[in-house]
Amino acid sequence: MSLIALLISGLFVNNFLLSRFLGLCPFFGVSKKTESALGMGIAATFVMVIASAVTYIIQQYILVPFDVVYLQTVMFILVIAGLVQFVELYLRKFQPDLYNMLGIYLPLITTNCAILGLALLNVTKGLNFIESVVHAVGAGGGFTLALMLMSGIRERLELAQVPKAFSGLPIAFITAAIMALAFMGFSGMI
């Protein structure tokens, strides 16, 4: 698969939020405001890209040669947890407003199944280092795109007259379902 196809696949066709339904906790939790959605998207993209690069190296140069592939999930989770701690410390020191806006959802990147799923998917597909990084950029961009679209819609819905039974999270679920249907239309592209 070409690098451009991998990038487009991560952005639209196999969007981790709207096609694979991974990482929904921060999707619904942080998508109330555009600023926090963008911050979460950038943080998650950073972790996805670095985690994909590091997990590729660990897989190819430690796990496979020493025949300890059964430790794959544990090693990948440790890498992701370390990267999230780095991002959290960085944001706390240099971007305290964004750190406070993201709140509990920032440490939850550690348990975000989209990031672990990406690392495992890269290994399962047999992607090389460059392909893994490009796939991570596409997946992170798709994650950010979905967060930004949802946050824009949710900000507009706050101003709309929605029946009381649908206000808040119920209308967010309905909106996400409609967005997921729209993104399924991309599956014919690749």
Image (cartoon, rainbow, N blue to C red):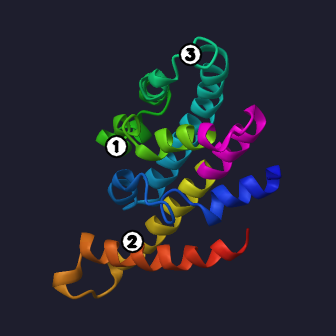
Q: Which image quadrant: the C terminus?
A: bottom right
| Labels 2 and 1 touching (C-beta < 8 A) | no
Task: Indicate whether 160 appears above or below 56.
Answer: below
* 101 over 146 or under it: above or below: above
Pinpoint residue 140: horizontal percent, then vertical percent: 59, 48
Tell me the CA gap for discs 3 and 2.
Answer: 48 Å
Along the line of sight, which residue is nearer the eye, 5 or 38?
A: 5
> Up-down: is 166 above or below 146?
below
Read off the residue under disc 3: 67
Q: Residues within 10 Å of mark 1 (few under 14, many from 20)?
A: some
Q: Amino acid at mark 2?
A: Arg
Element assignment for label 2: helix
* Front tag of 1 and 3: 3
Question: Is residue 55 visible in this depiction of the protein?
Answer: yes
Q: Amino acid at mark 3?
A: Asp
Which type of secondary structure does the marked residue at label 3 adopt?
A: loop
Please report whichever mark, 3 or 2, sits nearer to the chain's N-terminal start. 3
Foreground tag (3 vs 2)? 3
Residue at 65% in and 29% down: 53
Measure how far apart labels 2 and 1 are at the Cα level: 18 Å
Identify the residue at the far left of this view.
165
Residue 105 numbered mark, or none: 1
Rendering coords of residue 149 (x, y %) = 52, 68
Q: Residue at x 81, y 55 (%)?
A: 4
Sequence order check: which comes first, mark 2 or mark 1? 1
Determine which residue is flagged by label 2: 154
